[in-house]
């Protein structure tokens, strides 16, 4: 790459190692960037909707992931192109903020880029296009608000929430039992939600999976599930009305943190030391017993001697429980984490109605259920499935559903799915376009066309005739003045999404439109790409 | 070719690149113009962005002149001057970095024909300096002061300045939104010179409209230990204790060793250690603080201890954030927990942990001394937020400048056209060569409106002629007319609130003239061979490959 030449046609060396750098500028740069962005969108296009297909992704280590979650696909694709990376981040930020609609946002951006390319060829200034898009996105944003519906829900009436979550899950591999999954997700979110502050901390929902069983066995546990077993095989497997001591100190003689050394120079001293140690164990177990604990959960391990003593004193124990789980147990049971034995008091014990160890199938795997807790602000979703990939995908799908439920708690407005919202916006934008003088009008119209890409892809993926179906639905929307008409992906027989109960969250849709516009603007604004040539 | 046969006197080390005389000067000018061409298209509201991808794989998408110049990694000695002026403009006023490079490039371009015709560079330089002096006088004369207005009025005026800066950036679509935010932030920190009192936090996700301003401090939730979730997450009017000590159960002294001969003493040592940490924790609790922040770690023990007593704590808070909390809440950072008196505790109206995107944020708002503000930026991609941060930085600098100097001029190329007209008029009164030079200086200033038109895809010549006509009106009413970026015509920039602080223009003209003069005054470059032989070889082989037989320096001497 050379910026300038002297009178003999030799390049000046202006930039370090300029021979090895490549530069693309002007329309070429924009076209290359658009092509890259479109390529990414094309990959995801087939994953959209209830009949969307999954992708199999193999990592360099040979791990296999099967998913149709846009964010996950892009994350694992390990793209190298800079513009493609922007698309990856686009999908990621939709994931962070909303959790759902990660595929749709990329497809939308791809469609916008495709339309922009056509306008660029007509010689429209890229920034005028971007500005037109921005105007259009605002129109669409407001239009969505207009066609949105609010629905009320409370602790008992959760049907609408479940329906919305079902829409999300219907595109996933788990759609076989989406009803039960959606129920689980909604109940879990409601259990941990702070309805007053409209805040949901998803950290309090633990998602645990285990290979085996079938998907239908997936359950919601109002309490905690720990992938551990009782420290001694002879300990009782079931404890009712358990009082739980939650300890972060090991069952062993305490050690000062300062470097230390015990000098033993006689048999007597050795004996006392031994006795002391014995006494420590005795004391510890006794203290637990004294405060009334009937179960000990310990962050660290304890050796066989302590184990034996615990067994002897009839005090069941669980060892090596991770910090996060410990915290969740403490929250769920209303107990306090106790850092040393001296501080154990009856008030600090957690309470659970039932603690049981459960063995699975023919394997020796056991897990501990802590249920009927005093405070059920921490819950666990326990996923069963035929294989590891299935469980992983179910986890991701449930995450999406959880996010959707959370968003509804934050903002209870919904729009109708199945591409109906996009079609309605497209019509609104199209109608508004004529009011704008200047070049932007073209860009606004292009935006309306781009909005059609989502229902089009939905129809295509469902095996329908995309153009025919879309135009039929569009005309139906106008004729009946009904913004709820969408693509009938599941062949139910009606186009009215209200009857089909296909809902999406308003903020999710709005976010999709705004985010994709933003990224497209960024891509359009670039007219100069300077990069080392190996890329 | 006869010169080649003469015995060469070797004065400098082998490989040294020497070039001199007029050709050298011309080649320097070409290099500078080439660099100015790179940033040319980024000017103005319809300016484009550059994507620069460096060797380490970092990607930057930017519209900011200084950032682009820095990332280009320019090695040409003369062209480097342009990088420096862009940087100095950035640190001095924060905005107008593209303008300054463009102006310098244009001054040099105008000088080129004169140099080719044999004018002595010193003559040119002298005229350029006079012209820049006159231009600056004129700007000062034309500037409108916004001093003495009420706060509300001033706020809206400052927002106009910020909006002008932001209009050329990626976040231009939401310029009003961000301009108000920036003005609020700058007014919040008052006359404090410490810019780091405005914190910027970047959270990917969401749209840029989700960005918000906290009239206090916000930072990401720090690493937390088990027990954290049991702490309360919302306080009204809490007392805040700021610490710079570790609250962890660990050995007090690193290299101490305890020898025990009696196992019975064992327990006492253990207890002693526990007592030390409990004593510390107890003092924190006794101070009455409800929020405890520390720059160093707060261990799991302490977390649980505080959770038991309904106190919120966060360890490993970054130094910057801690300082900001101290400034906002009015506390002092303590290095010990002894003797904590009420005065060292800060307070704020509301403390809350809130979900922002995928992260949880600790937000302190409604701080009494209110000398800090935090902008939480949201956006669809990392590069997007990075660029937004740079743009906001520019806007913040502009607002601060405007607040201090409180004079503004009309943007959109209006002020440049006006100076240009004034200089032309002035030039006619001068006899001698200088007239030509000042005329060319005046012509160079027109590059700003011309480039604005070019970038927007308008017919530059047409617009410029309209502007010249307007500005030439004897009544002087055409002075604030600049390019109307929306219609492709001309408009009164001042009335349309396209404003920039006068100091930006003054500094830009000054720096650009200085740089142009500097490049013009050079007539010889002595470049030592690279000490890293690898680099030299790479360059040499590249040159050899072109079949020119030898470096540029020797080629020059041959002429």
Image (cartoon, rainbow, N blue to C red):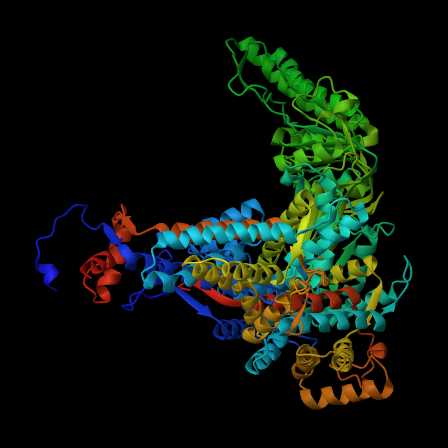
Q: Viewer-proximal residue, B407 or A254?
A: B407
**x, y percentage for residue A437?**
72, 79
Relative to B401, residue A187 above or below: below
Residue A228 seen in the figure: no
At horizontal 56% and vertical 10% (from top left) the residue drawn is A269
Picture quadrant of residue A145: bottom right
At horizontal 63% and vertical 32% (from top left) the residue drawn is B295
Q: Viewer-proximal residue, B371 or B21?
A: B21
Picture quadrant of residue A12: bottom left
**x, y percentage for residue B305?**
74, 29
**x, y percentage for residue B332?**
70, 26
At horizontal 53% and vertical 10% (from top left) the residue drawn is A267
In the rendered structure, the answer to whether residue B378 lies left or right of residue A503 reads left
In the rendered structure, the answer to whether residue A246 lies left or right of residue A23 reads right
Picture quadrant of residue B284: top right
At horizontal 52% and vertical 62% (from top left) the residue drawn is B424
Q: Quadrant of the N terminus of chain B?
A: bottom left
In the rendered structure, the answer to whether residue A421 lies left or right of residue A515 reads right
Relative to B314, residue B358 above or below: below
**Count of marks overlaid on the render:** 0
Q: Quadrant of the C terminus of chain B?
A: bottom left
Q: Viewer-proximal residue, A232 or A116?
A: A116
**x, y percentage for residue A90?**
62, 63
Residue B327 seen in the figure: yes
């Amino acid at each position: 790459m050379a910026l300038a030449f002297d009178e003999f046609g030799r390049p000046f060396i202006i930039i370090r190692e300029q021979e090895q750098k490549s530069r693309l500028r002007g329309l070429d740069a924009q076209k290359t960037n658009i092509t890259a962005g479109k390529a990414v969108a094309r990959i995801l296009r087939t994953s959209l909707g209830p009949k969307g297909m999954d992708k199999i992704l193999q990592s360099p280590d040979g791990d296999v992931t099967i998913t149709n979650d846009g964010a996950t696909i892009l994350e694992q694709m390990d793209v190298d192109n800079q513009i493609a990376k922007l698309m990856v981040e686009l999908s990621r930020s939709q994931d962070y903020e909303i959790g759902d609609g990660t595929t749709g946002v990329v497809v939308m951006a791809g469609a916008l880029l495709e339309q922009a390319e056509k306008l660029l060829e007509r010689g429209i200034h890229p920034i005028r296009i971007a500005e037109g898009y921005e105007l259009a996105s605002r129109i669409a944003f407001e239009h969505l608000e207009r066609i949105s519906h609010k629905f009320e829900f409370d602790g008992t009436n959760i049907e609408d929430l479940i329906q919305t979550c079902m829409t999300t899950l219907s595109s996933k591999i788990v759609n076989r039992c989406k009803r039960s999954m959606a129920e689980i997700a909604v109940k879990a979110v409601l259990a941990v939600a702070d309805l007053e502050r409209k805040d949901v901390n998803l950290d309090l929902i633990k998602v645990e999976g285990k290979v085996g069983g079938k998907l239908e066995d997936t359950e919601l546990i109002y309490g905690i599930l720990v992938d551990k077993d009782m420290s001694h095989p002879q300990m009782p497997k079931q404890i009712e009305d358990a009082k739980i001591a939650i300890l972060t100190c090991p069952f062993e003689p305490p050690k000062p943190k300062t470097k230390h050394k015990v000098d033993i120079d006689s048999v007597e001293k050795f004996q006392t030391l031994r006795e002391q140690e014995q006494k420590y164990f005795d004391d510890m177990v006794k203290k637990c017993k004294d405060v009334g604990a009937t179960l000990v959960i310990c962050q660290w391990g304890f050796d066989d001697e302590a184990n034996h003593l615990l067994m002897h004193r009839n005090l069941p124990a669980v060892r090596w429980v991770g910090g996060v789980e410990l915290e969740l147990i403490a929250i769920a049971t209303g107990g306090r984490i106790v850092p040393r034995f001296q501080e154990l008091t009856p008030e600090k014990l957690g309470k659970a109605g039932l603690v049981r160890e459960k063995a699975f199938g023919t394997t020796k795997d056991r897990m501990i259920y802590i249920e009927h807790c005093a405070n059920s602000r921490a819950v666990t979703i326990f996923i069963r499935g035929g294989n590891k990939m299935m469980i992983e995908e179910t986890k991701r799908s449930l995450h999406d559903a959880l996010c959707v439920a959370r968003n509804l708690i934050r903002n209870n407005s919904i729009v109708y799915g199945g591409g109906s919202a996009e079609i309605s916006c497209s019509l609104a934008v199209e109608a508004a376009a004529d009011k704008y003088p200047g070049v932007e009008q073209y860009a606004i119209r292009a935006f309306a066309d781009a909005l059609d890409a989502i229902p089009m892809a939905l129809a295509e993926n469902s095996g329908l005739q995309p153009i025919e179906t879309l135009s039929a639905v569009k005309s139906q929307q106008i004729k009946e003045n009904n913004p709820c008409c969408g693509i009938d992906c599941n062949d139910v027989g009606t186009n009215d999404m209200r009857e089909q109960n296909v809902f999406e969250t308003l903020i999710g849709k709005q976010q999709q439109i705004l985010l994709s516009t933003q990224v497209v603007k960024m891509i359009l604004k670039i007219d100069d790409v300077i990069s080392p040539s190996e890329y | 070719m006869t010169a080649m046969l003469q015995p060469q006197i070797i004065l400098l080390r082998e490989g040294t690149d020497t070039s001199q005389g007029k050709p050298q000067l011309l080649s320097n000018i070409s290099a500078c113009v080439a660099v100015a061409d790179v940033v040319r298209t980024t000017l103005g509201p319809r300016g484009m962005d550059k994507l620069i991808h460096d060797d380490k794989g970092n990607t930057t998408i930017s519209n900011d002149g200084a950032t682009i110049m820095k990332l280009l990694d320019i090695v040409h000695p003369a062209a480097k001057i342009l990088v420096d002026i862009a940087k100095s403009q950035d640190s001095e006023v924060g905005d107008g970095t593209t303008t300054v490079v463009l102006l310098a490039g244009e001054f040099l371009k105008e000088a080129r024909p004169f140099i080719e015709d044999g004018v002595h560079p010193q003559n040119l330089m002298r005229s350029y300096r006079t012209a820049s002096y006159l231009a600056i006088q004129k700007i000062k004369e034309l500037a409108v002061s916004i001093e003495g207005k009420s706060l509300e009025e001033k706020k809206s005026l400052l927002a106009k300045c910020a909006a002008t800066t932001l209009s050329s950036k990626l976040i231009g679509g939401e310029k009003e939104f961000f301009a108000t935010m920036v003005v609020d932030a700058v007014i919040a920190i008052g006359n404090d010179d410490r810019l780091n009192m405005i914190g910027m936090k970047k959270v990917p996700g969401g749209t840029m409209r989700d960005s918000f301003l906290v009239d206090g401090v916000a930072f990401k939730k720090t690493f937390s230990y088990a027990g954290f979730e049991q702490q309360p997450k919302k306080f009204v009017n809490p007392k805040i204790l700021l610490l710079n000590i570790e609250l962890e159960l660990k050995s007090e002294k690193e290299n101490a060793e305890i020898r025990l001969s009696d196992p019975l003493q064992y327990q006492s040592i253990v207890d002693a250690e526990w007592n030390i940490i409990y004593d510390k924790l107890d003092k924190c609790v006794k101070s009455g603080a409800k929020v405890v922040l520390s720059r160093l770690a707060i261990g799991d023990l302490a977390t649980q201890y505080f959770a038991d007593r309904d106190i919120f704590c966060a360890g490993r808070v970054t130094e910057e954030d801690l300082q900001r909390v101290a400034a906002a809440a009015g506390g002092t950072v303590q290095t010990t927990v002894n003797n904590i008196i009420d005065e060292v505790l800060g307070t704020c109206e509301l403390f809350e942990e809130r979900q922002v995107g995928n992260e949880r944020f600790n937000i302190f708002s409604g701080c009494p001394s209110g000398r800090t503000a935090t902008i939480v930026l949201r956006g669809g991609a990392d590069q997007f937020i990075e660029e937004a941060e740079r743009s906001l930085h520019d806007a913040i600098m502009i607002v601060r400048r405007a607040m201090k100097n409180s004079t503004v001029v009309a943007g959109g190329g209006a002020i440049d056209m006006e100076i240009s007209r004034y200089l032309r008029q002035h030039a006619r009164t001068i006899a001698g060569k200088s007239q030509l030079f000042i005329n060319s200086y005046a012509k160079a200033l027109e590059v700003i409106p011309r480039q604005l038109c070019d970038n927007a895809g308008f017919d530059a010549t047409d617009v410029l002629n309209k502007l010249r006509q307007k500005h030439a009106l004897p009544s002087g009413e055409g002075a604030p007319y600049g390019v109307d970026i929306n219609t492709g015509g001309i408009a009164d920039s001042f009335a349309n609130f396209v404003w920039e602080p006068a100091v930006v223009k003054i500094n830009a003209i000054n720096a650009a003239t200085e740089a142009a003069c500097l490049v013009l005054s050079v007539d010889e470059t002595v470049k030592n061979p690279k000490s890293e032989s690898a680099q030299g070889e790479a360059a040499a082989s590249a040159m050899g490959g072109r079949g020119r037989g030898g470096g540029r320096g020797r080629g020059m001497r041959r002429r």
